[in-house]
Image (cartoon, grey):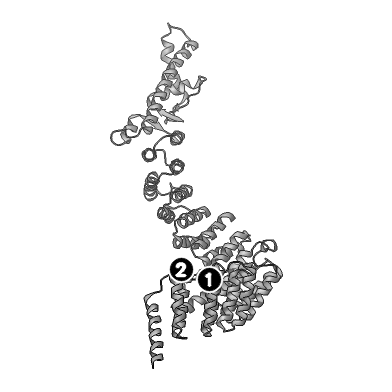
Amino acid sequence: MIFTSQRSAKSSIVSASADFRLQFRFVSSDSTLDSDSVIDEATPYSEGNEGSANNDFESSVGLDSLETEEVKEKDREAIENLLSLLQSIGTVDGPLEPHLEALDLVFDQELVLEVLGTPQVPGEKLIVFVAWILKKPGFKEAATAVVDSLTSVICSQNRIKEAYALWDFVREIGVKKKGILSTRSLNELIAAFSRLGKAKAAFDVFNSFEEFGCTMISDTYYLTIEALCRRSFFEWGRLVCEKMLNAEKLPEIKRIEKIIFFLCKGGMARDAHLVYLYAKDKKICLSRSCISSLVYSFSRIEKADRGTDGEINKENDRASVSLALELLNEFSVEDRKHATKPFSSVIRKLCWIEDVGRAKDLVLEMIASGPPPGNDAFNCVINGLSKAGDTEEAENVMDLMKSRGLKPDVYTYSVVMSGYARAGEMEKACKIFDEAKRKHSKLTPVAFHSLIRGFCKLEQFDMAVNLLGEMKQHGVVPNHDEYNKLIKSLCMKALDWETAGKLKEEMKSSGLILNGRTSALIEAVKELKASSSGL
C-alpha cells in the first residue's frame, strides 16, 4: 500500500537508499522531484561540519537514518488513523469526507486498491471513500479499476443494503461520468442481486448497459435470465433471452442448458425450443436431460386451459406434441435406451388430445427400437382406446403388455371393464373382472363401480346388489355415493323399495347416512306400491 504525505515527500526520497521495507509507504505525488533537490537537502549538514572540505558521509547517513525512523513512525500513525476511521462504525461525527481531508494524505491507485482490500470496513464507508477519491485530480485513468475493485468487495458481502447503495453510486457515475463503468462491474452487480433475490434490481442494471456505454457479453444475458427466472419473472426472462439470441451472445453449454431449464419451468417451451435450435445450429450438443426437459414441457397437460376455448387449445396441444415427437428423434442410440419417461410423457399427451392411434404407434416403435415401454405407456393407450369405444383393441394391447412380461395393475383391468360395461357387454366385463380378482388380492372401488353401473343400466339390479356385497369380501368399503346411486336406481326403475330400504339400513350400520331426498324417495315408492296394491 502506497501513501504520500506532502510534509515528508523529500525525506522519503532521501531515505530510499536505506535497506528497509514498510508495510505502508509514502511516495510524493510530485514526480518531478529530481536528484538536485536531494543534494540541496544534504548541504546544510555538510557546511556545519567544522569547515571540513568534504561531506562526512557516515554522519550524513546517520542523520538520514534518524529522519527515516521518524518518517516511518509518522507513516504508521497515519495509516492506523486512516484504517481506524474507515473501520469505525457509528463513531464518526458528521460526514466522512472532512475527516479524510484532515489526514492530509495524497492517494494513488495502489493505495486505494489496498484500502479497498482491507477487511472489516463497512460497505457504506468504502462507497463514500471511493466517491471522495474520484473527485481528486489524477484519478481519471485509474477510476475504472477502483470502481471494479469496490464492486467486487461490496458484492462479495451479500448484503442487501450495501448492494442497493452501490447501485445508487454506480448509477450516478454512469450518468455523470461516462466511460468509467465496466461490463465486469455491472455483471457482478447483477449476480449479487440474483443471489439476494432482487430480480427487479438485476433487470434495472441490465437495462442500463446502453445508457452507461457498456457492452453486453454472454455472461450479462445469462446472469440476468438467471436472476429473473429464480424469482419467477419468466416473461422478463423471455425478453432477455430474445435479446441474447438477436445479439448472438450464447453462453457456454452448461449455461445454455440452464436457460432452457428455466424457460421450461416457466411454461415457455417454445422460447426454450428456440434456444435449443440456436445451439443446434451452432453445432452445440446438449445433454439428454436438457432434451428431456423440452419434451416434458411440450408434453405438459394444462387441464385448466381446456374449456370454452377447448378446440383452440387442442390445436395448440397438437402443435406442441408434434415438436415433442421431433425432439424424441434427437436422442442418440445410447441415450434413447434411458429415455422411457420422455417417451411416456409424449404418449400421455397424445392420448390427452385423443390421438390414440399415434400413441399406439409410438408404443410399437418403442418395442421395436427402444426404450422399452412400461406400465404407464401401456395404460395410457389402453385407457384411450377404451374411452374411444375400441375396448377389444384395448384388451389386445393389454395382452401385448402381458406378453412383454409386464403385469397389468388394477387400473388396467378397471379401464377395460369400464369400456365393456359402457358398451353393455357385461359378460366380457365380468370375464376381465374375474381375471383381476385372480391376479390381485385387493381391488379398488372403481372396478366394482363400473360393473354396478353397467348392471344398473341393463336393469339387472340383483347382480348390482350382489356386487355391492362382494365389495366387502375383497376389503373394499362402499361409499355413500355408490349406495345412493344404487338406491335411486332401485326406486326409480325397479320400484323395489324393499331392497332399497335394506341398503339404507346397511348404510346406517356402516356409519353412513342417506341424504333426506333419497330417503324420501324410498318412502314415496313405498306409498305408491301400497296405493297400487289397494286399488
Q: Which residue is mark 1?
A: 445
Examine the rendering and report whether any part of residue 458 can be seen.
yes
Query: Furthest residue to the bottom?
Result: 535
Q: Disc 1 marks which amino acid?
A: Pro
Q: Disc 2 marks which amino acid?
A: Ser
Task: List x then y, in percent, for residue 1.
Answer: 46, 30
Residue 429 vs residue 300, the one in the foreground = 429
Task: List x then y, in percent, for residue 350.
Answer: 58, 74
The residue under the point 69% across, 61% down is: 334
Residue 471 vs residue 362, the one in the foreground = 471
Element type at marker 2?
Answer: loop
On screen, 167 above or below 282? Answer: above
Residue 403 found in image quarter = bottom right
Query: Is residue 237 found left or right of 91 in the rendered image?
Result: right
- Whichever of labels 1 and 2 marks the residue nearer the N terminus, that label is 1
On screen, 208 above or below 136? Answer: below
Q: Which residue is mark 2?
A: 510
Examine the rendering and report whether any part of residue 278 can be seen.
no
